[in-house]
Image (cartoon, rainbow, N blue to C red):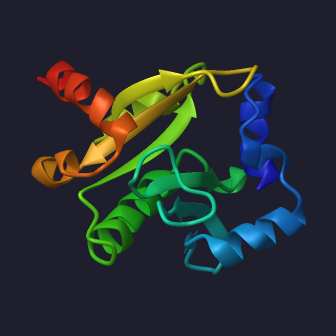
Amino acid sequence: MHNAYAADVNLGIHFGASTITEAQVRDHILNTPTFVLQTDDGKIAATASVRLPWSDNPGPFTLPHIGWVATNPLYQHQGFAKQIITQVITHFVKDELHAPAVSLGTAVEHPWLQDFYHSIGFQTIDIVRKFQDHQTAYLISIFDEHRTHQIEDVYLKKILPQTILNER
């Protein structure tokens, strides 16, 4: 995990996952749906997890929230992050959870992550300052606009109309 986030630390961006302990990783895996993408020879290429709204560690909205997206440095820039995110959304968020949308967060200051997430269907919904070293951009991918608007979430209802208008 630390190796996957090393490039971000070099940019001065310290995602929480960049400094976690082995015990925290174990706890996260036990309590958060976590997915692994392996190469043909069984090596871990990428990982992602989904924080659930009803868990002890929910995302910012009453939606599934993708986090801890990490690519093994040996396999970066080969499409593994896109592949695992797409598979997690399709097979878990949509097929199992039947969620109308999914969110994730990234650092505004990161030189390419927001563009990457936009390229796979996410739109920036809000920017907040949670950490001293970077601002967090919250992004959302909506699969069912009607059901998304029905979610009882004050924060989401406040910012969602602005997002939809900005995308049109």
Q: Name the residue at 45% across, 29% down.
A: 114
**Left or right: 16 in relation to 161:** right
Residue 43, percent from left and from top: 67, 74
6 vs 53, nearest the viewer: 53
Relative depth, front residue between 52 and 113: 52
Q: Is residue 152 left or right of residue 74?
A: left
- Residue at the image position 49 percent from the left and 63 percent from the top: 52
Q: Looking at the rendering, which quadrant does residue 30 occupy?
A: bottom right
Residue 108's place in the image compared with 8, above or below, is above
Which residue shows up at 79% across the image and 32% down it? 9
Q: Is residue 79 visible?
A: no
Name above or below for residue 133 compared with residue 49: above
59 or 157: nearer the viewer: 157
* Residue 2 in the image: above or below residue 11: below
Q: Who's the residue at 81% across and 50% down the image?
A: 2
> Where does the image place residue 55, in percent across and percent down from the top left?
56, 66
Q: Position of residue 109 (x, y in %)?
A: 60, 19
How many marks are shown on the rendered structure? 0
- Horizontal relation, residue 107 to residue 16: left or right: left
For the N terminus, the image quarter is bottom right
Residue 98 seen from this side: yes
Pinpoint residue 32: horizontal percent, then vertical percent.
60, 70
Q: Is residue 88 above or below residue 41?
A: above
Q: Quadrant of the C terminus?
A: top left
Q: Observer-nearest residue: 120 or 166?
A: 166
